[in-house]
């Protein structure tokens, strides 16, 4: 026992105490009652210093008493009675010492028990205060239910998070009724499992008492009683609304990345790839491949790797972003893929760069469109030059043969309108081709109603651009002549425009006929005008075949015949 005197101290104090009593007895009581003063001293010594010291004091007391008795004559001899009395003193005092020692031990144990009880009570009070503090400060909703699932307790922190102002208002309520839909089903299942002694958890959505909707992670577990059974259920609900919303937001971004048609990838700071979306896999031929074995530089041409490592990434670290045109390579076919490459740093919550992200757009369609536009602009410039040449030729010939300036102006305007009609048809087809029927309808519509006075018949054909311009001018001249002198100059005449393809490739030929009937009688003119020259010469020049006018009495006819490939586009080739 801590604080107990040492062996020498105990026995030394015992000896001093007995010696003191012996001196007091000799001085005050002499030979009277030699042992009675020693008994209280021995009891006190045994009580304070222990059983060993008490027995030692008993022996010393008996010895001191015996020394007093030696003075009775004969000197140095003891009679039988004092000896017996000494023996009885020793026995009774030793027994008393034993009782005192037992009492002392009982007192010590009682004191220890009282101390331990006080310590246990203090610890229990501390634990209770701690648990009360934990329950009050916890943001979890901690509840105790009875086996029927009715509320019997809710922590202070739980009341705050559930927005409960008075627990008594909901005490005894059936806990599963706080849930609706699938959450109600999950709550009933968890309650049934807890009744059977099993813990169960679920995630559900429920509103607080004030109607605030929240997501909860709920765990139910049975509470064991002293008999080993279960009479209560512990329910712990954690508000995971923020986490769930964060997860939902993350899912939205993931779905956005996965559904994007752009290349989206993530790299570590050392350039190793750890994510690419499906569009990226399709773009570069990585379907089903393990992209984590790749580095960023694997996507580029060897001559661009140095640019990426020495210019792109330093620019990202310096400026926070880089974008520009680079070239990817297709991993399976080796195809070169022009891309608009954008890369930016990915940082953690402390702002440290932990990787790089890239959103890359496939520029193949754009590059192809740019190339097509370049070719189209070149083709358009060429076509415009041709049209201007035609305009110059028409203008020069019209003015050269004109005897009247006003009439020449009218003729020139009409011919330019016809040229414009052909140009409109070509423009709609990007100056690559012209639909024959549409061209004829636009050229002849100002001169008569199509399908009534002007009848068209022929297959669907697509003319080459230069042929379309020449044919539009020729048809305008024929229609103008018919309106002035021929079948369209009265109310009864009509014009048939017929075209056809004869024979098989590669010897197939294209023929177009203009036939007038029902107009005034026709006589061959004495002088050939510019219109006739334009019709015959220009068509022969562009078609490479034959083109001629016949002035039959019943109506003017015109026929053009050429190789099919010289006038018509075949298999999409001009």
Image (tube, grey):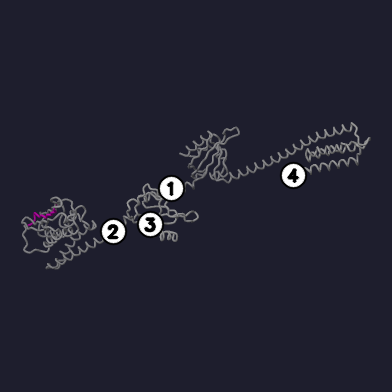
Residue at numbered disc 1: 251
At numbered mark 3, what does the secondary structure look like: helix, strand or loop? strand
Of the numbered discs 1 and 2, the one sitting upstream in the chain is 1
For the point 87% across and 32% down, the residue is 85
**Mark 4 vs 2, N-terminal side:** 4
User: Disc number at residue 3?
Assistant: 4
Between residues 331 and 132, which one lies in front from this camera angle? Answer: 331
Query: Considering only vertical position in the picture, is 167 above or below 543?
Result: above
Callout 4: SS: loop
Asked if residue 484 can be seen in this view, the reply is yes
- Could you classify mark 3 by the number of other residues whose Cα lies within 10 Å: few (under 14), some (14-19), or many (20 or more)? many
Q: Image check: 459 left or right of 344?
A: left
Tell me the SS state at disc 2: helix
Q: Are marks 4 and 3 in contact (CB under 8 Å)?
A: no
In magenta, the rendered stretch is: 508-520
Q: Are marks 1 and 4 in contact (CB under 8 Å)?
A: no
Image quadrant containing the C terminus:
bottom left
| 213 lies left or right of 373 | right
Q: Residue furthest right?
A: 73
Residue at x-position 37% and y-position 56%: 300
Which residue corresponds to mark 3? 341
Q: CA distance from mark 2 to mark 3?
A: 20 Å
Front position among marks 1 and 4:
4
Tag 1 near tag 2, CB within 8 Å: no
Which residue is identified by label 2?
Answer: 371
Residue mark closest to the camera, 4 vs 2: 4
Badge 4, how many Cα within 10 Å: few under 14, some, many 20+? few
């Amino acid at each position: 026992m801590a604080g107990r005197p040492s062996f020498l101290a105990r026995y030394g104090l015992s000896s001093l105490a007995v010696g003191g009593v012996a001196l007091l007895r000799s001085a005050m009581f002499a030979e009277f009652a030699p042992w009675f003063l020693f008994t209280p001293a021995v009891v006190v010594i045994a009580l304070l210093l222990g059983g060993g010291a008490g027995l030692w004091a008993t022996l010393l007391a008996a010895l001191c008493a015996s020394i007093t008795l030696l003075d009775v004559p004969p000197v140095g001899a003891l009679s039988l009675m004092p000896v017996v009395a000494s023996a009885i003193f020793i026995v009774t005092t030793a027994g008393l010492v034993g009782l005192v020692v037992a009492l002392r031990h009982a007192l010590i144990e009682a004191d220890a028990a009282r101390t331990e009880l006080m310590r246990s009570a203090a610890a229990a009070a501390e634990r209770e205060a701690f648990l009360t503090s934990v329950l009050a400060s916890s943001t979890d909703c901690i509840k105790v239910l009875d086996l029927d699932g009715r509320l019997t307790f809710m922590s202070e922190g739980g009341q705050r998070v559930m927005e409960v102002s008075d627990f008594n208002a909901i005490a005894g309520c059936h806990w599963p009724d706080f849930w609706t839909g699938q959450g109600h089903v999950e709550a009933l299942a968890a309650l049934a499992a807890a009744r059977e002694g099993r813990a169960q958890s679920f995630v559900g959505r429920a509103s607080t008492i004030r109607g605030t909707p929240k997501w909860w992670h709920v765990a139910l577990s049975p509470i064991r009683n002293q008999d080993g059974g279960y009479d209560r259920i512990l329910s712990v609900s954690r508000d995971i609304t923020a986490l769930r919303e964060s997860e939902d937001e993350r899912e939205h971004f993931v779905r956005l990345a996965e559904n994007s048609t752009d290349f989206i990838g993530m790299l570590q700071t050392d350039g190793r790839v750890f994510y690419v979306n499906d569009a990226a896999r399709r773009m570069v031929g990585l379907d089903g491949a393990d992209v984590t074995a790749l580095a960023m530089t694997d996507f580029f041409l060897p001559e661009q790797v140095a640019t990426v490592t020495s210019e792109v990434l330093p620019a990202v670290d310096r400026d926070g972003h880089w974008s520009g045109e680079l070239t990817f390579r297709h991993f399976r076919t080796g195809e070169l893929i022009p891309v608009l490459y954008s890369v930016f740093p990915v940082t953690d919550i402390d702002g440290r760069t932990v990787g790089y992200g890239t959103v890359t757009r496939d520029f193949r369609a754009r590059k192809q469109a740019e190339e097509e536009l370049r070719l189209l602009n070149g083709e358009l410039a060429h076509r415009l030059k041709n049209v201007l040449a035609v305009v110059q030729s028409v203008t020069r010939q019209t003015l050269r043969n004109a005897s009247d300036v006003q009439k020449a102006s009218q003729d020139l305007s009409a011919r330019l309108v016809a040229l414009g009609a052909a140009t409109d048809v070509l423009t709609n087809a990007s100056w690559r081709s012209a639909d024959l029927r549409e061209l004829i309808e636009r050229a002849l519509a100002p001169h008569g109603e199509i399908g009534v006075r002007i009848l068209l018949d022929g297959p669907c054909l697509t003319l080459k651009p230069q042929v379309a311009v020449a044919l539009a001018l020729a048809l305008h001249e024929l229609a103008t002549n018919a309106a002035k002198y021929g079948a369209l100059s009265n109310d009864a005449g009509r014009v048939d425009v017929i075209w056809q393809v004869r024979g098989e490739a590669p010897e197939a030929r294209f023929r177009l006929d203009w036939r007038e009937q029902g107009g005034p009688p026709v006589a061959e003119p004495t002088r050939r005008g510019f219109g006739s020259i334009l019709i015959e010469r220009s068509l022969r020049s562009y078609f490479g075949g034959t083109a001629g006018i016949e002035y039959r009495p019943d109506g003017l006819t015109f026929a053009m015949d050429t190789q099919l490939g010289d006038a018509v586009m075949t298999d999409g080739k001009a």
